Image (spheres, coloured by chain):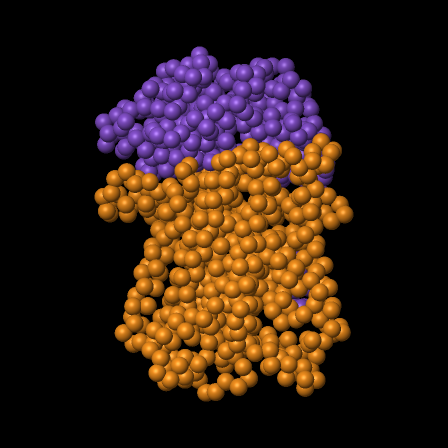
Chain colours: A purple, B orange
Amino acid sequence: MRLIVLVFAVTLAWAAPAAAQQTVNAYSIWPENWARPMFEEFEKATGIKVNFVRFSSGEALARVIAEKNNPRVDVLFGGPVETHAAGIKEGIFEPYKPPSFAKLPGRFKQADGQWVAIADDPLVFMSNNKFLKENNLKPPTSWEDLLNPAYKNMLQMADARTSGTAVTRIFSILEVYGRDENKAFEYMKKERKNVQVYTKSGGGGTLPVGLGQAGAGIFFIVDALDTKAKGYDVSISFPKEGIGTSAEAIALLKGAKNPELGKKLIDWATSPAMQGLFAKHKINFVPAHPDVAVEPTLAEVLKGAKIFPIDDAYAGANRKRIVERWVNEVLNAKD
Amino acid sequence: MRGRDPALRLTVLVLWALLGLFVLYPLVCLLARVAVDGGRLSLGSALAVLADPHLLRALGNSLLLAALVGVAGTALGFLFALTASRAGLGQGWLAALDAITLLPLISPPFTTAIAMIFSFGPRGLITYQLLGIKGVSVYGLASTFFSETLTYFPIAYLTLRPVLAAIDANVEDMALSLGASRAQVFRTVTLPLAIPGLANAFLLLFAASLADFATPLILAGNAFPVLPTQAYLQITGLFDLRGGAVLSFALLVPAFGVYLLQRYWVSRRYYVTVSGKSGARTAVKTVAPWFRPVLTGACVVVAAAIAYFYLLLLYASLVVALGANHAWTWRHYHVMFTEGARAIRDTLIIAGLSMPLGGLYGVLVGYLVARKRFAGRAAMEVVSMLNYALPGTIVGIAYLIAFNDPPIALTGGALVIVACYVFRYSPTGIRATVAQLQQIDPSIEEASLGLGASTATTFYRVTLPLVIPAFFAGLGVVFIRSMTAISATIFLVSINWTLITVRILENMTELSLGPAAAFSVLVVAIVYVVIAAISRLLKTFSVPGGASLGSVLGG
C-alpha cells in the first residue's frame, strides 16, 4: 500500500507543469517529424512553446468534437481541408483571419476564416522500380496506363469512405473526364480490376509499394517523397491528363484557453515565416502562400506536371453522392 | 450464506461504485450524446446506419471470424496447456514454451500485420521468394483469422493452464485403473473437467476478436468487411460518431449471447477437483508416452511460426530500412531512447499502476461472482465484461466524453488511462478466477468460516492462495495490455501523458519501420523482465495442488 502511495506521489510530481513559460496547446495532424521542427522554429521566433500531440485526421477531429465543451487544446494544426469542413458542421472552430488572409487565393481559405491553408499537397503516381523493370514498364504517365493488365492485382490506393486522398483522386478522375460521371465511373470500374486493396488511410499503400508487395499506387506527394527518402526504390510520375491537389489547413478552436497565443501560431503558420522553412526541414509540401518560392528539388519533381485544384463548391455539393456511387459500383462491384 | 457480512457488503458496494463510475457512466454519457440530435431526443438518424445492407454482411463476417478465432484459439490454447501439464516436459522446455506463447500477447499494434504483408504478400518473403507462388492475396478472411488466432490463443492458454493443472491426476488414475483406455479417460474425464476453462477461454477469444479493429483494418481487405473496423471508420473516416457508436453497441448483442451460452454450458455440471481431501499426487499417466512427442512437436511448430515473426521484427529494428536497405545499424535504438524516453517513462508508470490494481480488481470480482450470493451478482458479472467486449475506439471516446468536462474532469491525466486499462483488460483475470473457483470445493472455505474466520481472512488466507495462478494470469495480462493497447487510449493520451504504442503508431505513419520495431522489441524485453521478476518474487506463494507460479506466466 505504501508503495502505491509513493508511486502516486511520484506520478503527480512528474505530471506537474514544468515552468511558467507561455505555452499554446495543439493537436497536430501532420506527423511529428514535420510538426516538431515547425513548432521548434515557432518557439525560436516568438518564445512561445507549443505543446502538442499528433493524431490522424479522423482521430483528431473525433477528439476535438468530443471535447468541445471543455477544449483541451487551442489549435488544430494541419490536415486536409475536408477534415476542417466536417468540423465546421460541428461548430468547433472560432473564425479568425490572419494577416496573410487577403493575399491567399480563394481555395486556400474558408470565407469566414474558420480555417486557413498552410500548404498544398498534390497527388502523384508512385511505382516500385523493381516491379516496373520485371514487367518492362515505364512509370505511368497517363490514367490509361494504370489499366494495363500488367498491373493486375498490384495497385493500392485509398478507400473513398475513409480517406481524403481517395476523394481527391476520384474528383481528379471526374475532372479528367470533364465531369462526365458515367465515363469517370467506367474508368474506375476498369481500374478496379488491377486494384489489390483499397487501403483505409491515404498513405496506407506507400509501404507495400515501397516493399514491392504492390506495384504502384496514387498518393499525396508528401507521402510519396517520404517513401523515396526512406530509401525505397520508387518512381514518382504524373498523368498527362492532369491530377488534383488538396490544401492543408489550420484552425482556432472555439473556447480555446489561450486564444491570443493560438492566433499568433496561426499568423506565423499562414505566413512565409513558416512556409519558407519547409525546404530547410525537408518537408515536401507545396507552400500555400504566394510569396514563398517552391524549393528547387521539389520544383524539379513538379516540373511539367499538370495539377489542378479541386473545385470546392462542386466537390462539396456532390461528395456524398459520388462516394456512395463509388461504394456501390466500384468497391462492391461483382465481376 | 451470511447476508450480514460487513466486509462483503462493503466490497460489493465499492466495486459497484467503481463499475458505475468507470463502466456505466461513460457509456451512458456516450448514449446521451448519440441520442440527442440538435437538442432533441431522437435515435432515428443514428439508427439509419443499421439499415445499410453492407453492414449486415459486416456483422455476419464479424460473427464468423469471432467464432473461428474462438474455436481455433481455444483448441490451440488447450493443446499448449495439455502439453505443458501432461506431456512430462522438463523445466527448461516449459520455460521456453511459456516464453514463446507470451510473445503474441505482447505484440504491439500493426507491427505483426506489416510482418504478415512482408512475408505473405504477392512478393512476400515466404510466398514468393521462398515458395515461388505468384499472385497470392494476403488480404481477406484467411490471413485475418490466422493473425488473430496467433495473437489471441495465449489468452486461452493462460486460462486453461491452471485449470488443467488443477485437475487431480488421481482422478484420471482411478479411471485408468478401472480399465478405461487413455482415449476414454481423456474424453470422459479430462475434457469434461476442463469445461469451465474451455468455456471461459472461448468467451474471452470470441469477445476479443469481435472487438478487434486493428488486425482487420490492415489485413481484411475489401472483400471481407467486419463490424468493429466499420465502426472505427464510421467515426474517423466519415466523421460520424453517432453511427459508429450504434454499430459498436450492436456488437454487444452477440457478445452477450455467447456469455449466456457459456454460462448455461458450464452450469449443467459439477467440476470440483480440488477438495480438502485430495490424496497424494501421482504422476500423470493419461498421455501415452508415444503421444507426448506428437503434442510437443505440434507446439514447437506453432512456436516456430511465432518466433519467425518476432525474429523478423528484431531484424527490422537492426537494419536501416526493412525491404530497402539492410545495412546493420543501432540508430533506431538511439532514436528510441532519446525521442522516445518520455513515452517509455509514461508507459512504465501507467502500466505499473494498472497492474496491481487490475490484478486485485480481477480476482475480487471473480471471487464475488463465483462464490458469493448478493443482489445484482449476475449484473455485476455482465457489467464487468462490457468494456472488454466493446471495440476500443468506442470505449476511448466514451471515456473522453464522460471525463472531459466537470464534475469529473480526468482527461489529460494518467488516472483516466489507468482506469481504462483496469476496467477494460481485467476480464481475463476475472474469467480465470471464475474458472478456477469452479474447480475448488467451497467446503474448504466453509470450513475456515465455520472455524470462526471472517470473510476477509478466509479470502486472504484460503481462497487467494488457491486462485493465485489466476490472479497472476490476470495481473500479467493487464500489465501486458497496458504496455501494448492503443485503440482506446489513442483518445486518452494527452499533451501531458503519451505512450509507447502511440510512438509506434506514429512511426508507422512516418514509414519508420525501424524505430517502430525497436520499440516493439523494447516492450517485449520489459514485459519479460517484469513477469520474470514477479514470478520470482512470488514463488514463495506457490501452493501444492496449484500450478507452479513460475511457469504460469513464463517465468
Q: Residue furthest front?
A: B268
Residue B334 x/y as whole percent:
45, 49
Q: Is residue A152 visible?
A: yes
Say which of B428 and A269 sits in front. B428
Q: In percent of the image, x 45 and y 24: which residue is there?
A: A169
Location of the N terminus of chain B by quadrant is bottom right
Judge whether B385 appears above or below A75 on screen.
below
Q: Is residue B112 visible?
A: no
Q: In percent of the image, x 59 and y 57: which residue is there?
A: B385
Asked whether, in this view, residue A220 is left or right of residue B424, the answer is: left
Residue B247 x/y as whole percent:
57, 42
Location of the C terminus of chain B by quadrant is bottom left
Say which of A275 and B40 sits in front. B40
Q: Residue furthest top?
A: A178
Judge whether B485 appears above or below A263 on screen.
below
Residue B256 x/y as whole percent:
57, 54
Image-quadrant location for residue A151 = top left
Say which of B56 and A280 sits in front. B56
Image-quadrant location for residue A270 = top right
Q: In percent of the image, x 28 and y 45: which residue is there?
A: B127
Say which of B491 and B28 sits in front. B28
Residue B118 x/y as whole percent:
34, 44
Label count reads 0
Q: In percent of the image, x 30 and y 43: which residue is there?
A: B124
Judge whether B356 appears above or below B312 on screen.
below
Asked whether, in this view, residue B302 is left or right of residue B508, the answer is: left
Asked whether, in this view, residue B322 is left or right of residue A322, the answer is: left
